[in-house]
Amino acid sequence: MKGIMQCKRNLLFSILRGSYILVLAYMLLPAFTGRAWAGGLYISEFGTPSMGVAAAGAQAVANDASTAFHNPAGMTRIKGKELMLTGGALYSTVKFDPDDNTPIQGNNGGDAGGPAPILGQFYVHSLTERLKLGANIISTTGAVLEYDDDWTGRYLNTDVTLITITLNPTLAYRVTDWLSIGGGPQIMYADLEMKLKAPPPAGNGEVKIDGNDVAYGFDIGAMVELSERTRLGVIYQSEIEPEFSGDVKFKGGAINADAGTDTKITLAQFVRASIYHELNNQWALLGSVGWEDWSAFKNINISTGQGSQNIPRNWDDTWKFAAGVHYRPAEKWLLQLGFAYDTSPVDSDDRTPDMPIDRQIRYATGVQYQWSDRLSTGAQFVYADYGKAKIDNDLLKGDYKRNDLFFFALNANWKF
């Protein structure tokens, strides 16, 4: 009897090695968005004014403390000290529509989306006229996905909760009157908890995965000021490979067991270039183009006491294109509109429900108001359409009839 149970346990680990890792990746990748941009698995909505133009021109605007985050080189345009605080919420609507021939019977999972807060702090300190110091802290917490327990993809995911905190100190130096450079390290902490239904032979058991990790990266930026009205910005984000350590617990059904896991995931390096151009005192045009190296995300490596395995992902590089406009109807008011498009990182035969990512389209608007020489405030709204994210593989077949994110945030910028 003992030998039979051990055999079943080994079989369960073998099966889970090819299933729960699919969910781990979805939780981990949003958790490490210290330098977060749209495209692939990154987002760009952290409540800064650039959110109101879908991040178009974000690396070139450099008008407030948020430049310490978007492009550290832009901090050389800041005089004295500035602090920006942001806060808001995102709400996702994720509804799967299974095909009639999907392999596992079950319902559509209901609305797997939900709310999560947006919080950010950005600070610039002038050490000298040419040398600037910055500090950014960003926190994201909330349920990322929560499907019904008996949905057709229950062996891949039922729910997940995560908490992340990212610290990004930066430094900038004005090399010439027209050229500035900047950058800094990134320290990212994430804590997560995930649940899914255990596949046979565990009966109706449940798998719970939790753990935490600290990952490191860096960014380097440059800004070229062609004139008082026109400037260019570019930033490079390094690749990050967090090794997420945690526990996997099997409860109920035929087997109860615990196992430690180590999961290595590649977060793509990227390059983003932006332009900001003032046509006159009322109108300004903004644009961005970016490349993200998601083809490096070929596999996810997971290891337990029973061994290790690479789970194929087969993602492709993505490209981002964004355009926006600023309009000042009066000296104290700034109105914003923006649009962004990101290419899809994965084909339908490689896509999985833990990462329902397709091409992305963003529509953004915002407003800023200058209360005084020292204080300005603003509000931004973004609607992001993540596409149908069609899935056509051996585990699941169907697409998403709703795959939307709604972002709303406020900001306040103080000059000292």
Image (cartoon, grey):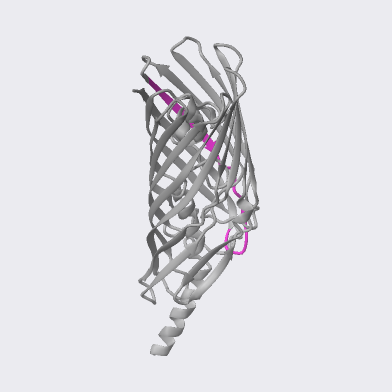
- Residue furthest left in the image: 416
Please tell me whether residue 383 belongs to the stretch shown in magenta.
yes
Q: Residue at x 57, y 50 (%)?
A: 268
Q: Say how many tags the image has.
A: 0
Tell me if 412 is positioned left or right of 77 in this view: left
Residues 386 and 283: in front is 283
- Is residue 147 in view? no
Tell me if 294 is positioned left or right of 43 in this view: right
Q: Is residue 85 above or below residue 20?
A: above
- Residue 145 in percent (x, y) is at 44, 51
- Residue 90 in percent (x, y) is at 42, 38
Q: Residue at x 61, y 55 (%)?
A: 296
Q: Residue at x 38, y 55 (%)?
A: 192
Quadrant showing the C terminus: top left
Quadrant showing the N terminus: bottom left
- Is residue 46 in view? yes
- Residue 251 in percent (x, y) is at 35, 70
Residues 340 and 331: in front is 331
Please tell me whether residue 64 belongs to the stretch shown in magenta.
no
| Stretch of the chain drawn in magenta | 376-396
Tell me if 254 is positioned left or right of 180 in this view: left
- Residue 347 in percent (x, y) is at 65, 53
Residues 89 and 333: in front is 333
